[in-house]
Image (cartoon, rainbow, N blue to C red):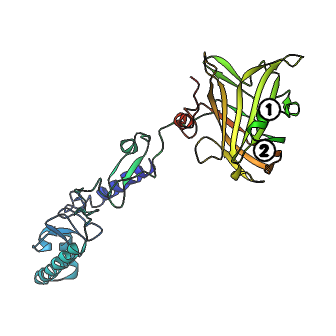
Amino acid sequence: MKNFFFILLALFLLISCGGDDPEHEYAAVQGTLNGTCYPNKTCNEGLICSENDICVKQGENGDTDNPANHDLDADSGNSSENDTSESEDENNDASDSVSDNDPDENGSECGNGTKEEGELCEKGDYVNCSEVDDQYSSSNFAICNDSCSGWNTDNCESSQPSAQPLASFSARTHELTYLYNGLTAFEKMENQEDELWKTALFNASISMNGETYSIPHPQANVHWITAYYDSSALYFYQTSYLCNDSMNCQYATPDVMFGVELSALSAGKELFIGISDENQVNMLIEDVMTNSEQDCVMLVGYGTLKVDSVNVSAGSAGNFKFTTSKIGLYLPAATPEGDMTGELEQAGYKICK
């Protein structure tokens, strides 16, 4: 909007100049008869640029059609004969100038005031940003670029509202003193007693469809917080259960899990949590699909994870200490990166309905 204001201001000043001069009843359009020349010293077809930067008829005395030349004669005292010879010289120079301007491969010349074949727009043109792409709002304007091949959208703003998290996990530091070496050891849960917690590491409460969705389930009283690594990645799980005094337990969704490639793990490194390839950590909150025992992704997390220390030596149980930022929780279809359901489904995950 600011740029549009300056354009209007410039037009107002141009029209107002010379408004009291009877010889300037209107401001001729640039490139047309009696109008100013284009910046490359050319005019529209049939006209040439005089030494006063005014467009005059080609092959005729510039004094005949250009009031500015009369003013110049009166001040300088030059005779009309001299003006004629000078005008002819100007015509020759202007003709040479036009021939030296190289058109593009389509034969069009960007900046001559006329949109020609092969040009999407002409210099000085501008349109509402939403006309260029409906992803932009209508509050600003796109300007024709320097090659007349498209629109410069630097001033445009997205029309899509920024995604807002439904809830968030608090920032925290945690140390996993025992990492299972491989999936087989993880499934045997040989170190389970050291990994049972009365309080979940990640918890949140979300209002959805008039109901409260809790992570973990509000009746869960035991939480298995553990991780394992293989040759390529480290996988973290927070799985919850409802257990009685005899430790007879029932599984309670949802689960919290994240994965990170081993190549990204080094002490002091800060990693981004998200879904796309630009993020080194993927955090998923999985539930169970309605009327099904199949797991599905309910929410995804966005934030950062700092590696405080890590040991994932081959052939031994490792350890991992990390600090997370506040992590925002989003529906897969409405994340800060946009709709990520396609990426998740392509990776083999189901989306909760």
- The local secondary structure at tag 1 comes to helix
Q: Identify which residue, 317 or 289, lies in the foreground.
A: 317
Q: Position of residue 218 (x, y in %)?
A: 76, 20
Q: Identify which residue, 181 or 62, lies in the foreground.
A: 181
Crowdedness of circle 1 by 10 Å Cα count: few (<14), some, many (20+)? few
Using residue 85 as the reference point, say whether residue 128 is left or right of it: right
Using residue 333 as the reference point, say whether residue 103 is left or right of it: left
Q: Position of residue 272 (x, y in %)?
A: 66, 46
Disc assigned to residue 323 = 2
Using residue 259 as the reference point, say whether residue 192 is left or right of it: right
Q: Residue at x 88, y 30 (%)?
A: 193
- Residue depth check, mark 2 versus mark 1: number of the one nearer the observer: 1
Q: Residue at x 17, y 73 (%)?
A: 70
Looking at marks 2 and 1 on the same chain, the residue that comes earlier in the sequence is marked by 1
Disc assigned to residue 188 = 1
34 w.r.t. 141: above or below: below
Q: Amino acid at mark 1?
A: Lys
- The local secondary structure at tag 2 comes to strand
Q: Amino acid at mark 2?
A: Thr
Q: Is residue 311 visible?
A: yes
88 w.r.t. 309: above or below: below
Q: Is residue 200 visible?
A: no
Q: Position of residue 36 (x, y in %)?
A: 25, 65
- Report which quarter residue 331 is drawn in: top right
Crowdedness of circle 2 by 10 Å Cα count: few (<14), some, many (20+)? some
51 w.r.t. 210: above or below: below
Q: Position of residue 44 (x, y in %)?
A: 19, 63
Using residue 231 as the reference point, say whether residue 33 is left or right of it: left
